[in-house]
Image: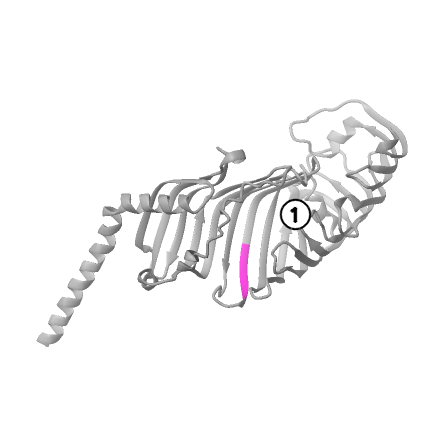
Amino acid sequence: MKILKRIGVVSAIVLGVLLVVAVVVPIVFKTQITDFAKKTVNENLNATVDFESASLSFFRSFPYLNFRLNDYAVIGKEEFEAIPLATGKSFDIAVNLLSVWNTPIKIKSIRLNEPVLKVYVLSDGKANYDIVPTSTSSDTSSSAIALALKSYTIQNGSIYYNDQILGLETSLVGINHKGKGNFTATVFDLDTETTIDAASVKYGGIGYLDSVKMELDAIFNIDLAQQKYTLKDNELQINELKLGANGFLQLDATGENMMLDFSFKAPENDFKNLLSLIPNAYTQDFNKVKASGQFQFNGTVNGVYNATKEQYPAFVLNLNVENGEFKYPDLPVGVSNIQTNTNIRNPGGSLDATIIDVSQFGLSINQDVVKGKLLLKTPLSNPDVETNIKANLDLANLVKAYPLEGVKEMAGKIIADINVKAKQSDF
């Protein structure tokens, strides 16, 4: 019994010492840890990295050792000087404690709290995310770290993307994302859950999505040896519209060519779901909006994407709406007889080969009617337009039928009978 008591006392002492070390060491060496982390990171990136503090903890990710950066910022250089590529409240990495005394150090999980990522691509192709310097050295010190992830998490993040080459602007606000999988395997399934509070997309100066809510539950099969990423079980919801997709993405050995083979469609065809995507339409009382009609939406993407060579895959997008109508509960007038037959296609290669074919579109507000068609070819080099539009629209009725933020009254009429068949070069 005395031996057991002595073992218990010794064990308690050892445990107490370990707890004291676990608490005291990160506090005592906080300055040294912060300085070392800043020096190491800045020496290995073509950017200025700063943060309020760095710390170690044995408790935040128990049983793993947790390394945290607080209030960090990654600032670009040269053309991107003073432009933050990434900022955030905290960045946590959990590592296998035993691997700290050996190599490689095994990272078990990553957590980003309130990260903000701002990506810019200039018209000459330079991008602010290209911050890893090219090395001709045979030194492989990066092998001192191994990605043995079990999970990763993004809490309340934001991403802003501005591509001057494509004329594309995207913002994603309120991102909450988590993923888990056996990252140590060559082939594994990555199980993800994502929600976005407000997603906006503008292309060529035209807004296609405006602060829509998004949810995505998806499983990706990842084959690291083949650099192939296959979309398995998935469901994407944008406001009220649900989409399903199948296909894969694969990189070649150079990493420059990306093979895409995807198909997607809307499994439901209630027009009200499509209506929720239109800017200003998705109001707080959207569930009370009366709507009817049918729509079909589907598409494919197939071929090689190479950003350097500006090579794009072939794609097709089809949207058909039949007998759509809606009325908001607080507005006196409804919109009816909504029709469209739209096909957007590209055979692959250049974006200039894109053809936008709206063989018909139309709607009625009270007795007012708008209808027409549009065919657009070579949109980048020499827009070739063939269109016919007829309209007799009282703007006062528009405000009575559709919610326009900040607009209570409108006056005047649009009476049009337009026929155009010309190229930009004709002018």
Observer-nearest residue: 346 or 281? Answer: 346
Q: Position of residue 185 (x, y in %)?
A: 50, 68
Q: Which residues are magenta?
A: 188-193
Residue 354 visible here: no
Q: Is residue 189 magenta?
A: yes
Where disc 1 sits, the SS reads loop
Observer-nearest residue: 25 or 304? Answer: 304
Question: Which residue is painted at 54% across and 61% down in the image?
Answer: 191
Observer-nearest residue: 8 or 262? Answer: 262
Q: Position of residue 31 (x, y in %)?
A: 28, 43
Classify residue 197 by image quadrant. Answer: top right
Q: Position of residue 119 (x, y in %)?
A: 56, 41
Residue under pointer 1: 308
Q: Is residue 130 magenta?
A: no
Question: Which residue is painted at 40% across and 51% down in the image?
Answer: 92
Q: Residues within 10 Å of mark 1 (few under 14, many from 20)?
A: few
Classify residue 32 by image quadrant. Answer: top left
Observer-nearest residue: 289 or 6? Answer: 6
Question: Which residue is painted at 72% across and 47% down in the image?
Answer: 274
Q: Position of residue 172 (x, y in %)?
A: 57, 43
